[in-house]
Image (tube, coloured by chain):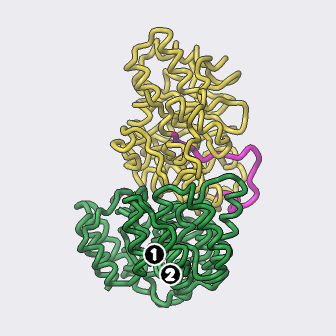
Chain colours: A green, B yellow
Amino acid sequence: MVRELLTELMEERLSDNGRIFWNKAQSELQEGAEGQGFAKLLALASRYAKRQPLGLTETELAAAEGALPGWSPRAWNRLELLRVNLILARPDLPGDSFERDFEAQFRFADEGETCALYRSIPLLPQGERFVWRATEACRTNMQTVFEAIALDSPYPVTHFDDTAWNQLVIKALFLDCPLYRVSGLDQRLSPELTRMALDWAEERHSAGRAYHLGLWLCLGPHDEARVLRLLTDHWPSASETERAAMVLAAERAGQQAWLASVEPQDPEVLPYWQNAKEGRSDQTQFAPLFADDHSAQ
Amino acid sequence: MQYFDPHIHMSSRTTDDYQNMAAAGIRAVIEPAFWMGQPRTNVGSFIDYFASLVGWERFRASQFGIAHYCTIGINSKEANNEGLAREALEILPNFALKEGVVAIGEIGYDEITPAEEYVYQRQLEFAVEHDMVVMVHSPHRDKKNGIIRSIDVAREAGVPMNKLVIDHNNEETVDDVLNSGAWAAFTIYPNTKMGSERMVEVVRKYGPERIIVDSSADWGVSDPLSVPKTANLMRERGIDEKAIELSCWGNALAAYAQSGQIDEEELAKPAVIDQRQSYNDNTVLRGQQPRVDEPVPN
């Protein structure tokens, strides 16, 4: 279902030359193109599609969410869409030959190809085969590569163990990624994750540096005293955007008494406060606060 | 105005250089694959080096608003390690067709040995087969003869002359290159190769057609601001603005855009530093004083 959707999205956006390339590539893949032959298709795709945003419509976005909960191609570019389609068009996806060849592709992949390879992982059958590879993306120095595995994908929350999951979330916080796009964050807000986020906040405070907005998504109903202290201490100097995030965070962290006590006056904060008081504080509520998140469009 | 440095080894340069280059108006660079100052001992070193040219280094450049392209090739010096060179030739196709790879290069001759000729010819064949531009490094010693030979061999292999760039020219070689129909690139280097002043006179004498200025800055004493510095000296000495634009931007773009791997429309726009690709502190380019007032000395 996801495959059909991706092919549809791509075909509507391909140039005539791109369509010729895609048709030819499909037959090569059916005939068993792998190794260097497969790598060549992924590389040559750059001649037929550019790194332009997909510009998905609301209907298309909804179709994506419906096809695979927690997944969205909203931040993909056209070249990535073509490349993921090439990967998914291989006839041997469930087999050992694909598993070996998929791993081998990373050795020769450039930055754009690396992102596309990672974007395909949540869409591959028997996803558990690629857990090590997916955690490898979290060790990258390139934010584009990290986000290709970390955002808009149900893969990490489904397949990562606690160490890998916590590292992913805290790295996303470090890099100031839009954390509301880490799928399944709400389901895995563990005591350990809350502690790590609190420790990070203390380090930032000692260094005299501002908090990233993502901090307020990482606090679960744990470590009550520390969370309360953070909220109380930071509130007077917090920006309006931060205050909006903080009232949501308070509800998530079970700090109802503090939440009731703040009574914000600012019209920007007020709707979030009302939402929080009525228990609407899931991660999607934070989305409008990440206004400079151009990658999500 | 914005500048294109179509030959610079950024992997060997610091972030200070990137900052100064961006502040001086350098909008795009090409990083040709070359040797690392000491010989590689196994093919894995080539793989990781090529991978960094299309991966990490491109990403690094983007953080400063500089578009980074590269060329992939086995350099002439290391062609003499025959066993290793053959292994490297085998993995060349894994990198040469990638996004942003604008040519096969820098290839050609160093000592003009049969081993160098073999590797040069194989790479020319690959370029012809895949309709690619070729960037040729001309030798330091016996330069003139080396250039003539590299043009002849490229022509024999079927490389169209408008897809051939000969680099590291000087006053003695420029006639042969321009007469062949190839592009003539000049490396502006302190102490060796060309200085800015000589370059001004070359443009005055030959005009800007098919003339390209670059820095070839690397791990040695070299200057990543050679292109804007030379452009400024041309301006000071009365060279026509159009000629400056061609030799320091337009010609390199025209030559390498034949690869189909340069989005010219995108490049014409002012640099946008992708927030997601930038450092946490996005003010890295502020307050930099580019030192472009002094020309590169001869």
Give the residue drawn at x 45%, y 88%.
A125
The answer to whether residue B260 is left or right of residue B220 is left
Look at mark 1 in the image and give the residue it sits on.
A283
Residue B159 located left or right of residue B135 = left
The magenta-colored residue range is: B29-46
Describe residue B167's horizontal placement relative to residue B217 as left or right: left
Q: Crowding near pointer 2: few (<14 within 10 Å), some, many (20+)?
A: some
The picture places residue A136, in percent across and down from the top left corner, at 62, 73
Between the C-alphas of marks 2 and 1, the distance is: 7 Å
> Relative to A126, does residue A186 appear above or below in the rendering?
above
Of the image marks 2 and 1, the number of the one nearer the N terminus: 2
The quadrant of the rendering that contains the C terminus of chain B is: top right
Chain of the residue where label 2 is placed in the rendered structure: A
Measured as percent of width and height from the top left, residue A225 is found at 67, 76
Q: Secondary structure at mark 2?
A: helix
Do discs 2 and 1 share a chain? yes
Q: Are marks 2 and 1 in contact (CB under 8 Å)?
A: yes
**Residue A27 percent coordinates (x, y):** 33, 77
